[in-house]
Amino acid sequence: MCHVCVMESVKKKMLSRRDLFRGAAATGMVGLAASAARPALAQSTGKVVDLTHTFTPEFPTFGGEPGISMEKTFSIEKDGYQLFRVTYDEHSGTHIDAPLHFSADGASVDELAPEDLMCPLCIVDISAKAAEDANAMVEAEDIEAWISANGDIPAGALVAMYSDWAEKVGDPSFRNDADGNFAFPGFAQSATDMLNEMGVAAIGVDTLSLDPGNSADFAVHYSWLPSGRYGIECLAGLAGLPATGATIFVGAPKHGGGTGGPARVMAVL
């Protein structure tokens, strides 16, 4: 599907499903991270890992246009101090998707409960699958395998997909295949439906989208976000982190009525 067609499909689907979403996100966030995250913090060694890409106009975006611009409005030479006017797209760089992004009246980014932005971090490694298939997905069986190896996923956790895709930033293959089609890993709805039932607060990916690049229906966006949960896209630094045991801190923006925005995301071990 062409890039323009994908975006038009999203717009039409959001309008046609407006009534379905109305009230769907009214339940708000699950609010379970507070009790789950505090024990993880108590066990922390204090090591901090930055999971955020540096945000520049060259950073790849879903739409293909630069996601940020900076204009120097004051300078040391002229004014004695420096200041930039920064303009950015909410959904560019390492960023958060709030429920409002894919629902008519879901929670905006400023309405997310702060306790849900501090979560136990569980990392599902699908890098081997992704090396064989650019549109590989975290499936329900991957979640089951993770649980068998690591124990239960705690309520209020953030479950992140590690596909090793962050290493491709700066190369066209981060976004597209050789034919110019979107091609990158993401979550399957079979996995996110399972995580929803477990009371997981959020999901994250090291790619441009919660859904895989070849998705034509944005099934995960349309099911996960309207349920009152959020997502993080374009994570960095997941390589080398343990599958479990870290706490993730999501420094979400807080502009009123926002559907998301660039975030500083860190893991504490």
Image (cartoon, grey):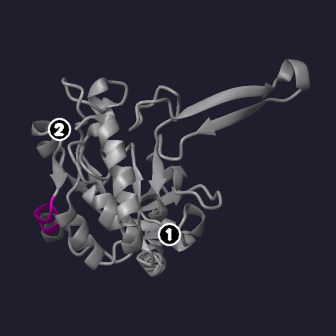
The numbered mark at residue 134 is 2
- The magenta segment is 139-144
Q: 27 or 29: which is nearer to us? A: 27
Is residue 128 rendered to the left or right of residue 192? left
Is residue 70 rendered to the left or right of residue 118? right
Q: 149 or 6: which is nearer to us? A: 6
Which quarter of the image is occupied by the C terminus? bottom left
Residue 103 rendering spot, x and y as whole percentages: 43, 65
**Can see residue 130?**
yes
Above/below status of 43 relative to 206: below
Q: Is residue 66 magenta?
A: no
Badge 2 marks a residue whose secondary structure is loop
Q: Residue at x 32, y 62 (%)?
A: 222
Q: Amino acid at mark 1?
A: Asp
Badge 1 marks a residue whose secondary structure is loop
Q: Main secondary structure of the magenta part?
A: helix
Above/below status of 56 relative to 92: above
Q: Amino acid at mark 2?
A: Ala
| Residue where numbered disc 1 is placed | 105
Q: Quadrant of residue 72?
A: top right
Which quarter of the image is occupied by the N terminus? top left
Residue 44 rendering spot, x and y as whole percentages: 45, 65
Above/below status of 131 relative to 250: above
